[in-house]
Amino acid sequence: MQSIEDTKQTRRIQISGGSTYTISLPKKWIDDLGIKNGDNMTIVKNTNRSLMLFPGLDTEKPAKKAVITISQKDPDESIRRKIIAMYLNGYKVLQITSKGVKLLPEHSRLIKDLVRKSMIGTEIVESDSESITIQILTRLPELTFAVALKRMHLMTSNMHKEAIDALSKNDSQYGEEVVGMDDEVDRFSLYMMRTLIMAIQNASMLYDVGLEQPSDCLNYRTVISRIERIADHAALIAKRIKFLKEPLDSKTLREIQTLSGDALACFDNAILALAKKDHVLAEKTASKIVDIVEKEKEMMYGMKESKNSTIVKFVLEDIRRTAEYSSDIVEVVINETIRNIVSEK
């Protein structure tokens, strides 16, 4: 069992020259970490008035490679989950091998489709009958977290608008095009999850991708998952069009469009409040979301049975869920900004 001296010590800071301060480090710690005289150290100043110190430079770290062996009996979803897990955990080279047995054609197609549809900045650099090697070419912070989040939000917002438009036109082909947009949202979701996991493991990367402190990683992970779920519900609205028995009547359509517009406005304002760290806007948005949920209940209870009533109820639920997931984003904003409105004593 480690003693307190192994993990925490107090040392006095001393001035050395006109513009430099020095602090001594325990020899045992340096030996345990394998640091030698003359090695580089990276220092990070955090926003919570703390410093982080770790050995080496980012440029000195070798590319991490992950190798996974699959068999012909492995289910497609199992292979998919493993590859995504390797991608999320920050590996720069992913190798999938069957060790002496040919990869099944369906497994090979699965891997290639996954790279093309779901993993930003990846390319297959080697491929033969027994293995496929994937390399992540995107180097953080080429796409900052703020930029990726904005793109993900805009894509999801457009998905919802176009899903309602397709529903209004009773155009199932248009709806299928909207469903296809969900792949792009998923790609950004995985990229951003990978970014957060790597940032929480490497404090200097927080600033490279535009974040301020480790707790941001937890908050933004919630935000990303909620945006992804909003996109999923937009895709569900689009999928339901082909099950309509007849075009929606004008009254029902107007009510759906109004509720949808309100829910989408709350989603947009939740993201805006997050970007601006605006506690007041977050609170106003939270109140409007409560109204949307109540309105959806009223529409559900007041609906008359018809050929399309089941589909309409599902669509209303999708819209309500969009508002509720926006509420989760609002809660992140309120949690982040509460210190701006309280008095600490």
Image (cartoon, grey):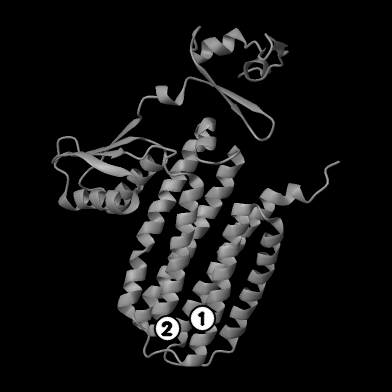
Question: What amino acid type is highlighted by mark number 1?
Answer: Gln
Mark 2 element type: helix
Mark 1 element type: helix
Question: What amino acid type is highlighted by mark number 2?
Answer: Ser
Q: Is residue 29 left or right of residue 186?
A: right
Residue under the point 36% across and 69% down = 178
For label 1, the residue is 257
In this view, the residue farthest toward the right is: 345
Residue under the point 37% across and 91% down = 246
Q: Is residue 243 above or below residue 146?
A: below
Please provide percent x and percent y for residue 8: 67, 19
Question: Marks 1 and 2: CB-CB under 8 Å?
Answer: yes
**Quadrant of the image occupied by residue 271:** bottom right
Quadrant of the frame with the N terminus: top right
For label 2, the residue is 168
Quadrant of the frame with the C terminus: top right
